[in-house]
Amino acid sequence: MTDTAAATAQPAHVDQRGPRAFVVESRHKESEVITSFVLRPADGRPPAPHEAGQHLTLFAEVPGHGRQKRNFTISSAPNGETYRITVKREPAGTVTKWLHDSAEPGTRLDIARPDGSFVLPRGDERPIVMVSAGVGLTPMVAMLEEFVREKRHVRVQFVHCTQNGGTHALGKHVRDLAAASDGIETTFLYTRPESGDVAGRDFDISGHLSLDWLAAHTPLNEAEYFVCGPLRFLRDFVPGLAQRGVPVERLNYEFFGPVEDLFGDATDGGTTPSPQSGTVAARTARAVHGFSREQIGDALLDSAADAIIASATDGTIVLWNAGAERIFGFTEEEALGQSLDIIIPEPFRARHWEGYDETIASGVSRYGAGDLLAVPGLHKDGRRISIEFTIVLMKDETGKVTGMVAALRDVTARFEETKALKKKLAALEAATGGNS
């Protein structure tokens, strides 16, 4: 079979639930601390589609640490064949160290479907400004690749900060992308250039990026901003750009952690958000009788009373609390990355997924306003249990459903007691001929 024929016969992507086996096809050292890994599906079929800027969830068996789950941004635009992740080796990072030290071509990993709302706007009405630091450039590189591939007619400014040439990842690749498009302009800032780093060749500015520079060199009144980098970097530039007048709806940032950690408040010396961004911080940082919403949320999640389970749009479990382990028997390590099928008795799965997919597509559920759904569940040991639950749909700023969170309670004892009482009542009615 020729290469052309083989490509034609390539089977389509399989829309399966749960993680899928991939292998490391190749690895490429991008800097002294950053390496890229190209990942290909082990079954030879195309990977699940993604949008430039999204992340994937990776599961790896790390010796001495068991099965680990981490999110990594896909640093390549969709190509229908592979994903690329570009990973910084963190000294205390269990998975990043393992990837750098042990993940060679042929290493197998499990990958869940890509997700995330840090993606480009559909239209080209506004110029785009990408501001990144360190390994935060990864989603931006995927976006640049997509701009070049699609020949989009929009002005893009790519502003990247790093220490020096030794830590600068994907620099040549970004320059090549810019050279291939009339609309891409790059600016590289080195905070501590070394003797071998040449201004005008390797970098453009020596020193730190400032809000004043962005105000002078980027169109604050027009542009859509994408910001990605370490926490301190984000705390400087996300609220800072809002203070300079960039509306919140034009501020996009990739951040893992509580929003109040990003915006800070006046009591801890953090940056005080402007009125435009204050509404974002207020949604998550306001306190209730001295307890922050985050503290209340953590207390509920850490409780062993009720199960709190979050799942992605494909039904993959992404959060599993102590209550879920108590009720269903699976540990967090065993449950994360698995399909919800592990807690659904087989005869009920088809009906469950029909309702699940309909809810994801419509964005509406009749079980999210206090109504409880009573269904059978499945324990790890194979026992049927009775559960009641309610769900909350998680949505991004556009209203698109990104997953579900369910609160579940084990009502097996009550169900069995009710069943026993009904049985006694039926026996009593039979003995008395239906007369009480």
Image (spheres, rainbow, N blue to C red):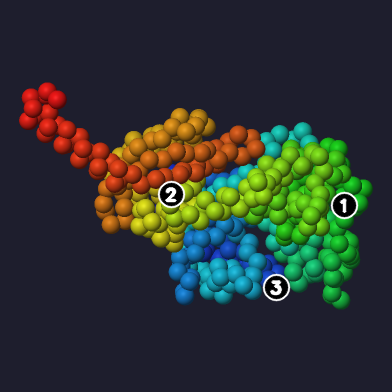
List x then y, in percent, for residue 171.
75, 62
Q: Secondary structure at mark 3?
A: loop
List x then y, in percent, for residue 134.
73, 62
* Along the viewing direction, whichever of 304 and 98 lies nearer the viewer: 304
The amino acid at mark 2 is Asp
Residue drawn 48% across and 54% down? Answer: 303
> Spatial distance from mark 3 to mark 1, Cα to Cα?
29 Å
Q: Residues within 10 Å of mark 2 (few under 14, many from 20)?
A: many
Q: Residues within 10 Å of mark 3 (few under 14, many from 20)?
A: few
Q: Secondary structure at mark 1?
A: helix
**Residue at numbered disc 1:** 211
* Marks 1 & 2, CB-CB < 8 Å contact: no
Query: Residue 99: which numbered mark, if any?
Result: none
Q: Nearer the viewer, mark 3 or mark 2?
A: 2
**Residue at numbered disc 3:** 32
Which residue lies most toward the front here?
436
Say which quadrant the C terminus sits in. Answer: top left
The amino acid at mark 3 is Glu
* Along the viewing direction, whichever of 225 and 348 lies nearer the viewer: 348
User: Which quadrant of the view contains residue 354?
Assistant: top left
* Marks 3 & 2, CB-CB < 8 Å contact: no
Residue drawn 51% across and 61% down? Answer: 69
Q: Is residue 15 visible?
A: yes
**Residue at numbered disc 2:** 306
3 or 2: tag closer to the N-terminus: 3
Residue drawn 52% across and 32% down? Answer: 363
**336 in relation to 368, above or below:** below
Residue drawn 30% across and 43% down? Answer: 414
Asked if residue 107 lies left or right of residue 375, the reply is: right
Q: Is residue 20 visible?
A: no
Q: Nearer the viewer, mark 1 or mark 2?
A: 2
* Marks 3 & 1, CB-CB < 8 Å contact: no
